[in-house]
Amino acid sequence: MSKPTALKGRLADWTAPDYFEVGPEKEASFFTQFMRQLLPSHRQRTQLTRTGWFLIIVAMGIGSAAYNTASNILFMTLSLVLSSLILSGVLSLFNFRNLNWTVLAPKQVRAGEVGMARVHLENQKRFLPTMSLFCLVEHLESDRKERIHLQEAVRPGGVADFECSLTLRQRGLNTVSLTGAESEFPFGFLNKIFKLEESTEFMVWPASVKYSFSKEVGGRRVMSGSSRRLAGVGTDLLNIRPYVQGDPPRLLHWKATARLGKPMTRQLAQEGESGYWIEIDTQASQWSADSFERMCSAVCSLASDLFAAGRFDGIWFPDTGFTLVRNLSDLHDFYDRMSVLKLDEVMKASSKMRKPRRLQFRATDTQEVSIYIDETRAGQTES
Amino acid sequence: MKPVPDKLKAEELVQLKWLMGSVLTLLSLWSLWSLQFGLELLIVLGLVMVSFSVWRPQLLEKIPERLWTYMGPIILVGIVADFALNVSGRAEFLPPLVRMVMVLLIYRCLAPRKRREDLQLILLCLFCVVLAGVLSVSMLFAVQILLFMPLAMGLLFTICLLKYSDTDEPKVTFLKEYRVGLLFGRVRASLDYKFLGFGAFLFVCMVFVSSFIFILMPRFNLDQAIPFLQTGTTSKSGFSSEVRLGKVTEIRQDNSEAMRVDVPSLDAVTERPYWRMLVLDRYDAGFFRQSSDAASLVHMDVSRLESRLLNGWERWPVPFSEQTGATWTFYLEGGISQYLPLPGQFNRLRFSSAKELLRNNSLLTVQTDIVQQSVLSYQLEDLQLSSSVPATNDEVEAFLSSGAQTSSIDEMDGPSYPMSLLELLMPDVDRAYLAEINESLHGGERMNALEYGRLVVGHLYSNHLYSRSPSNGRGEGDEVVRWMREGGGGHCEYFSAAMILLAREAGYPARMAVGFAGGSWNSVEEYFVVRNSNAHAWVELYDAESKSWLRFDPTPGSDTSDTSVPFSDQVQIDVGMAAWVDSLRIQWYRRVVSFDQDDQLELAETAKGFVERAAKAISEGIRGGVESVKKWWGEIVTTGDWWRTLPMVLFAGLCWFCVRYRQFFGHLWYRVFRRADEMDPQRKQASVYIRKLDIKQAALDKKEGTVPGRFLAIRVELEAIRFGPEQDRVTIAAIFARAKRVL
């Protein structure tokens, strides 16, 4: 099976996005295809099922009786049985032809949660449906392959989705792979297994944790109603800028969009109370492995809540410095960075920013993580 | 937009599976009907039960599941008891086996079924169909197996679909909602007719493939047999070693086919054939029988053997000049007789597999050990139809020494063969009547058997008419003599018996021959058909001059052949639908049942001959073409008419031009006739090369980690053709040639 190439006719249109992607070798020559059926490549395996073994035994019995008795009735039966086996192989081959597989990773999934991956199957055949398939899915943390079966037949030109739940325990870059498809179609004699090499990567964000946090500690209260020269969720118009993914649709500025011919978003000034920024300390001397994980989870959980409340300004990393988090997209980027954050063996300078409402995280003796606002303890994670 | 067919739910698939299993069972029970094991009642019961389960399976669900479980051991006990009580020899093994399979089949069909049980059901059904086919060798097997295969595959397909759904176990509720009509409606609504059509097409292909496998499968004559598959049955009573007067005529009531004969050609049948099966020598009060006591057998040259090939009669060989290797193939229907119809002398008798035979060299008959239940086929090589049969030396000596003495019931204790051929066991009154007739016929004059026979035949013709219901009232004395006295109508046995009695009384050894006479010609497939209505009895009279047994047929109307007209012009021709249907049967026997190694060789020879002829025709055609060109050129050179070469030159020039500038023409064709979405062939070809290059590049990269520079260079050029402005044909051709070399 190959990646989507044929939009119309035998050859792909060069405008197809994956036109130049190298896919599995596709035999064009009939002779090569024929030989491939006789001597399948390592990508294909055919196993006899229990029914198939019975069929073979029955065929051998009939064959022995036929040769013993020279009865043409038995020869006729034997030839019909053998040809049904051939038919089974041919139909099984057709069942797997012209299928386009795509793996869609779960989105916005945190460690400790169950993510739903999807395998999207497109049947590019013109006449024949595809049915009775299993696909084999695995991901980095799993020790076995998940077998997901196709609930209904996929009609010619139709699509189907297999859903697979993945239990993700650790944060970080994960891969969900479609390693193969198998089917006993049509009669259950042969189990044909095709090896597939479709995979996609996705980020597993740090797990959510419970924590306690008191915002008033160390926070300088700003009078409600004033606006800040920071983008936020207030009502004062701060700026009109191009649309970026994650911006709420309600903030689209339609007049500017019509005038400029591209989506434009209203940027509102931050209103109400002032925001916090988080300083991340990745020094290995400060953290054990468990407390570091806890810290990452705490950071993300707190950041998520602060962002929802409109009180999250940005984050400071030792290697990249301060980064504003203005919208959902920035937030997700931040989560992605936290997913792959590692302890630094090398001492790095701490932040020199003297911005107020700096949130810091420190390990405690009990493997929990304390939250500090401007050096004042304001909360901690709870188990 | 076409509506998408509504798919069947899992519950409906379970119902469909149930229905298909039941239909398979019905098919299997139907196939068992052709076996003559006295199972009709059980089959009918099974059919009724299964049909009921198709109509109302809900009632079966009322049976507790535990009961089905307990039924298993009960059935097992019944089966064991059946075997123990009934199996006393190999022939009795089959009926209890078939009963066992039937009971298991009905049980499995009616009991709740899961996947494993469905597979068991399919296996049992296959066993039934195949067993019935092997035992009956009937053409119906072809129909049944061709119905069985798609049903079984459909059932397996449904099982496969259920495996991949959430429900693959039948549940009580599924059959509660079962309605046959509803289910059919749902199936029809959910059918994708294109897929169904494709499936039907594939099934036809499968049948073709299986035919090829059947033809190509090597055949070996192991001459082994599974003993209990050699089933016997009772023969039609007129074709056994004891024949009561009237029994042959009973067979004649039946117009079904008894035998089919593949003859080399209709002209090979030079006279009305008498298909001689058995010879009866002893007569006793209305019974004709064959001598079977030990003493008689000693005087008969009988040998028992197991073979598939027999040589012809030693004392009746086919003259060398008439040995052409022509074969007559006989297909004798099951249940006719143990005795093989042998209408004359032959060079070799051949079976498809070894058979146990009893060969009587005195009477020149061959019989199998049992009456075959299914069709028996055999071949006779160099068969010569004959109206006389040579006598054995023992017969000649015996008749020479005995003279014209006849025995009477008081004087002899049942003579052994061949003296039994002069035996006349009847009251003196009847003997006196026979003597009176003989006196009136030959007036005491001694004549040869031929003359005497003709006299007797003439006498019987003129005094009696043919009738299937002989007018023979009750009375004392011999039945045949009584019939002769009364002068009424009679059938062939009476006429033959009368002639035998008269001949014996006159001192001519005579015996009754039984078999078939005549037949008809099937014009569709060109073979001889002999029906049970052709059953006949005639007389063999010993002729001391020629030392042979002469055939006489004293039955009026039986010998309709006019010797001045060839028999092929007189024979009845079968035409019409009945003939066509019967021709299917002979095709079945010829092409399937009797297909053997020789047929494979013949097919191979035919194929080889065809290929050789085709090759020869082609080479001759080419040679002829070359010769004509040479001749044409020679004429031009001789006559100097060079202008005659002009058309050829123009044609050659046009061909060269088209080949040389094919790309231009291809492009022109594309410009004029292209579809809106069709790509320029040059760009298309470049795409193909780019794709091939990608694949090869990826493979090399994976293997060696680097990509040769020539790949990159040629890729740039190909991309220029594919995406860039149009280039001239010569440049493109050169780039394509380089791409081919790189690839």
Image (cartoon, coloured by chain):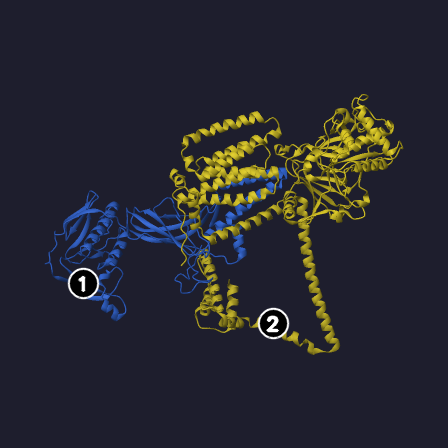
Chain colours: A blue, B yellow
Q: Which residue is mark 2?
A: B655
Q: Which residue is mark 1?
A: A268
> For residue B448, which quarter of the picture?
top right
Q: Nearer the viewer, residue B552 or A111?
A: B552
Q: Nearer the viewer, residue A135 or A367?
A: A135
Residue B595 image position (x, y, % from top left): 65, 44
Disc 1 marks a residue whose amino acid type is Leu
Question: Does residue B617 lie above or below B241 as drawn?
Answer: below
The reply to whether residue B498 is in sight is yes
The reply to whether residue A132 is in sight is no
Residue B677 image position (x, y, % from top left): 44, 67
Judge left or right: residue B703 versus residue A328.
Answer: right
Residue B674 image position (x, y, % from top left): 48, 69
Residue B233 image position (x, y, % from top left): 64, 33
Q: Nearer the viewer, residue B474 or A239?
A: B474
Q: Chain of mark 2?
A: B
Looking at the image, the residue that sits furthest to the left is A223
